Image (cartoon, grey):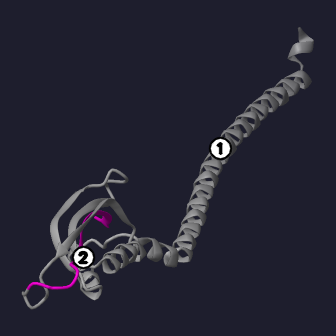
Amino acid sequence: MQILNSPRIKNARKILFIALCVNLIVVSAYSYILIKIGQKNRHIAELSRTVETLVNQKTNLKLAEETVSETALLREQIDRYFIPEDGVVQFLNSLQSLGADNNLELKIISVAIDQATLSPDIFESVNVNVEIFGTWSNVRRFTALIELMPLKIYLNRIDLEKVTDETSSSGSKNDSAPFYQWRGVLDLRVFKLK
């Protein structure tokens, strides 16, 4: 027992105790540092994902802006296929002037604006019923010119009927052969932007 109580052993115990305390402190500090490094790594990973998301959004936005600017002319051309939002009256006036330019009597019988079956949130369907009266060549030219208008016009129905005009323009009976006129009824459908 004296060996255990000797001053050398007491010093060794003290050194061992101090070494254990220092090791405990070092292990605690090391554990604390590892925990903090893990937290910082998770925070950095989260920030990296956020930055990557923002960079992707910025890239996508830039690409979208480039696409919008590149397709502006094409979108303008496509928009010309449809009646503008407030262009129904202008369209009807253009039909009447087209009829007058072709020496036709043109009467707009009805105009109806309905929901379009194709993309009803963007378009409305303008249905126009038109009656025309004139010579065969003028009626034929009018229907051909309607198809050449810059708008996409659907001819849902076209009825043509030959009628005779047995009186001349002065109101007297014409002694020559009867003058044939044509009466046409056209049902047109055009899409209008909302």
Q: Is residue 29 above or below residue 170?
A: above
- Which three-letter amino acid code belongs to the residue tagged 1? Lys
Closer-to-camera residue (93/44): 93
Disc sitting over residue 36 in the figure: 1
Helix, strand or loop for disc 1: helix
Q: Quadrant of residue 113?
A: bottom left
Q: Is residue 129 left or right of residue 146?
A: left
- Which three-letter amino acid code belongs to the residue tagged 2? Tyr
Q: Residue 188 in the image: x percent, y percent?
A: 29, 64
Residue at image point 36% right, 62% down: 154
Q: Residue 153 in the image: x percent, y percent?
A: 36, 67
The single residue placed furthest to the bottom in the displayed view is 170
Location of mark 2 (residue): 180
Q: Quadrant of residue 184?
A: bottom left
Q: Is residue 93 above or below residue 192?
A: below
Residue at image point 14% right, 86% down: 168
Q: Which sits earlier in the primary sequence, circle 1 or circle 2?
A: 1
